Image (tube, helix red, strand yellow):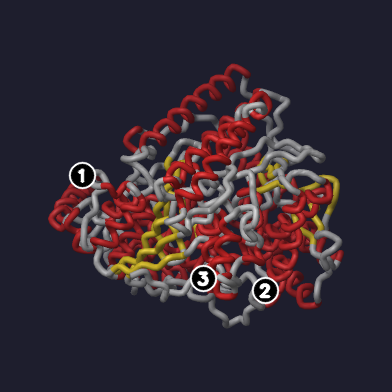
């Protein structure tokens, strides 16, 4: 598995070097290995999906929309950073907890914005549509609302 | 570890005063804290963008927000902030993306922080309090490049913020171990301090009954036992980061020291205990609005508060089924909020949790009139916030925002009545009073073990701090607020100058040009980046003078406002050294006005000499600084702009900070 990852990583890096783009550039067209994702994003989703009921998307003002959008952008970048690392889902949960708190969001697990941002973060990290579809199907199989939100964030 | 919104947001320009209580003393004060206290009191109002306007209808939009997040605009903005005395004499640089400003600042921890703050805060601090004109250079780019550049700053920010969190975790671990070694030091877990073991509440008893109904009679007991065992099984391990993870470009692994895990578990234990025994709020942790305010609930408020209490109760019952130690703080906030909402409904008057800690920074006021003015200003703003919340309908976030504002309002009144300093927090306050569960497992480590753990943690902490200073250094010329902006822009394009040039029109290398100087950086951008346009946000004083001149004789306004004793705008404060004349809005007269300024600086130095033994040379030093900043005036330069720390809310434009017209263009 590690060797496969290394080979793929090298191919990815070489391919990217030609375009001179960083791995997390949105211009990347090479597909990413799901291995690093499954250690963070998928673990997070699997863990969160056990406790999440229906997602909320309430917003009472444009100011709250902007706050949510700001939080969403942070989550997007966080996800793209995690796809570069081999961290566990628990750590990502802690980071989301902290980011949400900084943005005044207490129930981040219930916020639809969290999952759309995860979807757009995966897109930013260069994951293909099929990879993301597979990821959500495996990580949160019984949570169609979560899946929809992630795919919506990805742009599907 | 509960989310900490204070991390990385502390204003480095403020000097922390020692937490002394001195009811009858007037101390020298750093007024910025006082003014920022007022500004931060109205975080929720500030977020709505409405200060003095009538409460908006539900469909109102905030005025002239530069961009909506779902439409990426084809520009971002470079801000050049004019110079002022002290560490600002070279000016300052920042970037603005929509309503968020990114800028680099050296903090007292000797780490060069990338600060991210709303335009309101930034403009209030620099443009009003520090009276500095801001030049906004709008740089045209494709939406994709704008996103790319903004993402680079977000990445930098998030990576640094994670490092700072790790540093804080290590500090917390040290404190915790020290408290175990020294029995005189108390230790407690944030949020638990609001619970009383002596009282019961029908709310918690009701929640308990519903939990038992849903999950079984033994649910809480089993949960308690599991948590208890987890605490007993906890071990201390050194938390370190490999050297190669210390990078501004690599997201670091999180450190989760023993103390953080213990905090969450103890909090969870307190939650099970509270629910099992139906504990209520400690009445000493509840604050009431001043008697001068009408805190009686309206009919609509009563209904909304009641609905919110019921919603939170249902959420708690739902959440307890899958609660994780990480969630313990948020769960507890919901629970204690439920309890204070119940108190509000019982008394039919607003009740709030005390969210300002006894260990908060203290603001001492110089002049009782300052405090009186603040207390007069605060009240209508609080009422406006209350009305707006009523129109929007309460949720937890809104109530917590109102609670934060109420705490600051109550604090000002209490300080005024008690002639004591004001407790202050730079960010939104949350309920964080510390306490412990009634029954928790004791840590049975020997003294030698504790000492060893503490020594190791201290070493790790110091090493981490040192590494942070290495990767986020500040150097006057090579690594400052301007150079790091250009370097971060470069990182958005993978350090490839040709890509930067393609996107922006030119690659500006701060190491090979004078663009490390903020004003020159602005000049280089205007001259070389494609599609730029410039607007200017006049400093508070200059903007006011411009308005005065519309109704009065320009000459009269000039003489009145230039001379500090006669100025209707400027009030002398302890931030400034003595000076007689403003020289920022006149070039020709600068040398003439600079001479008396120099003389007054000399006078302050001389006056400061006899007081050397008492004030440790503070007055004399200020006099020397006054002379230093007067010297450029003799050769037609200006640095000093004065500080306007006593500006009242009524002096700001109702649409602040968005009242600036986009048509104000400097050719």
In contact (CB < 8 Å): disc 3 and disc 2: no
Q: Nearer the viewer, residue B658 or B568?
A: B568
The label nearer to you, 2 versus 1, is 2
Q: At 62% from the left edge and 18% from the top edge, which residue is drawn?
A: B447
Q: At 56% from the left edge and 68% from the top edge, which residue is drawn?
A: B656
Q: Give percent across and percent down for residue B289.
A: 80, 60
Q: Is residue B355 above or below residue B149?
A: above
Q: At 27% from the left edge and 56% from the top edge, which residue is drawn?
A: B524
3 or 2: tag closer to the N-terminus: 2
Q: Is residue B445 above or below residue B166?
A: above
Q: Give percent across and percent down for residue A65.
A: 51, 71
Q: Give percent across and percent down for residue B579.
A: 57, 46
Q: At 21% from the left edge and 50% from the top edge, which residue is drawn?
A: A9
Q: Quadrant of residue B102?
A: bottom left
* Label 1: element kind: helix
Chain on which label 2 sits: B
In contact (CB < 8 Å): disc 1 and disc 3: no
**Residue B352 seen in the current view:** yes
| Left or right side of B165 for B450 | right
The residue that disc 1 covers is A3
**Residue B225 seen in the current view:** no
The residue that disc 2 covers is B388
Q: Residues within 10 Å of mark 2 (few under 14, many from 20)?
A: many
Chain on which label 1 sits: A
How far is disc 3 from disc 2 in space, using C-alphas?
19 Å
């Amino acid at each position: 598995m590690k060797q496969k990852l290394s080979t793929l990583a090298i191919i990815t890096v070489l391919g990217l070097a030609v375009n001179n783009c960083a791995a997390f550039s949105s211009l990347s067209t090479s597909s990413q290995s799901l291995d690093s994702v499954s250690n963070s994003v998928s673990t997070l989703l699997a863990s969160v999906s056990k406790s999440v009921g229906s997602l909320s998307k309430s917003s009472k003002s444009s100011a709250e929309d902007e706050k949510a959008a700001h939080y969403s952008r942070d989550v997007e970048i966080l996800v793209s950073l995690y796809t570069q690392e081999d961290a566990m889902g628990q750590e990502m949960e802690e980071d989301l907890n902290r980011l949400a708190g900084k943005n005044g969001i207490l129930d981040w697990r219930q916020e639809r914005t969290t999952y759309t941002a995860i979807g757009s973060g995966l897109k930013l990290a260069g994951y293909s549509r099929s990879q993301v579809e597979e990821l959500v199907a495996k990580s949160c199989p019984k949570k169609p609302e979560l899946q929809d939100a992630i795919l919506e964030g990805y742009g599907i | 570890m509960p989310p900490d919104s204070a991390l990385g947001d502390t204003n480095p320009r403020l000097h922390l005063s020692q937490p002394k209580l001195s009811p009858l003393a007037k101390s020298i004060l750093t007024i910025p804290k006082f003014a920022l206290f007022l500004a931060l009191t109205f975080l929720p109002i500030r977020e709505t963008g409405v200060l003095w306007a009538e409460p908006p209808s539900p469909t109102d939009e905030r005025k002239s927000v530069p961009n909506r997040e779902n439409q990426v605009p084809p520009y971002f903005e470079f801000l050049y902030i004019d110079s002022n005395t002290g560490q600002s004499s070279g000016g300052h640089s920042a970037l603005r993306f929509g309503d968020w400003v990114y800028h680099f600042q050296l903090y007292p921890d000797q780490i060069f922080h990338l600060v991210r703050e709303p335009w309101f805060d930034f403009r209030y601090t620099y443009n009003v309090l520090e009276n500095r004109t801001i030049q906004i250079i709008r740089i045209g780019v494709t939406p994709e490049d704008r996103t790319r550049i903004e993402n680079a700053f977000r990445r930098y920010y998030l990576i640094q913020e994670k490092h700072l969190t790790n540093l804080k975790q290590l500090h917390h671990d040290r404190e915790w171990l020290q408290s175990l070694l020294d029995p005189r030091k108390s230790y407690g877990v944030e949020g638990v301090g609001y619970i009383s073991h002596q009282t019961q509440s029908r709310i918690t008893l009701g929640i308990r009954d519903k939990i038992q109904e849903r999950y079984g009679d033994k649910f809480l007991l089993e949960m308690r036992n599991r948590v208890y065992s987890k605490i007993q099984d906890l071990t201390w391990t050194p938390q370190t980061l490999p050297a190669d993870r210390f990078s501004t470009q690599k997201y670091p692994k999180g450190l989760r020291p023993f103390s953080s895990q213990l905090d969450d578990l103890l909090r969870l234990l307190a939650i099970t205990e509270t629910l099992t025994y139906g504990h209520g709020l400690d009445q000493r942790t509840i604050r009431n609005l001043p008697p001068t305010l009408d805190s009686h609930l309206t009919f609509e408020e009563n209904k909304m508060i009641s609905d919110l209490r019921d919603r939170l109760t249902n959420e708690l019952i739902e959440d307890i089924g899958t609660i994780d130690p990480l969630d313990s703080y948020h769960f507890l906030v919901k629970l204690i909020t439920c309890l204070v909402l119940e108190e509000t409904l019982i008394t039919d008057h607003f009740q709030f949790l005390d969210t300002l800690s006894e260990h908060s920074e203290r603001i001492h006021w110089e002049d009782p009139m300052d405090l009186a003015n603040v207390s007069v200003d605060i009240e209508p703003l609080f009422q406006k916030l209350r009305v707006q919340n009523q129109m929007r309908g309460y949720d937890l976030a809104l109530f917590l925002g109102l609670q934060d504002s109420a705490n600051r309002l109550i604090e000002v009144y209490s300080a005024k009545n008690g002639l004591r300093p004001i407790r202050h927090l730079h960010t939104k306050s949350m309920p964080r009073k510390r306490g412990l569960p009634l029954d928790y497992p004791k840590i049975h480590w020997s003294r030698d073990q504790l000492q060893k753990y503490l020594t190791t943690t201290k070493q790790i902490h110091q090493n981490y701090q040192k590494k942070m200073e290495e990767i986020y250094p500040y150097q006057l010329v090579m690594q400052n607020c301007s150079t790091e902006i250009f370097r971060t822009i470069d990182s958005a394009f993978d350090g490839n100058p040709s890509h930067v040039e393609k996107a922006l029109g030119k690659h500006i290398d701060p190491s090979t040009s004078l663009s490390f100087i903020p004003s020159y950086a602005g000049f280089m951008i205007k001259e070389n980046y494609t599609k730029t346009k410039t607007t200017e946000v006049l400093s508070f004083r200059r903007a006011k003078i411009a308005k005065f001149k519309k109704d009065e004789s320009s000459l009269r306004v000039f003489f009145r406002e230039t001379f500090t004793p006669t100025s209707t705008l400027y009030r002398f404060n302890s931030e400034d050294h003595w000076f007689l004349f403003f020289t920022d809005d006149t070039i020709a007269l600068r040398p003439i006005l600079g001479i008396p300024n120099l003389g007054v600086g000399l006078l302050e130095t001389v006056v400061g000499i006899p007081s050397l033994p008492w004030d440790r040379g503070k007055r004399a030093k200020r006099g020397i600084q006054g002379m230093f900043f007067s010297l450029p005036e003799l050769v037609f330069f200006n640095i000093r702009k004065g500080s306007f720390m006593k500006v009242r809310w009524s002096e700001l434009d109702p649409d602040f900070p968005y009242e600036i017209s986009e048509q104000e263009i400097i050719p």
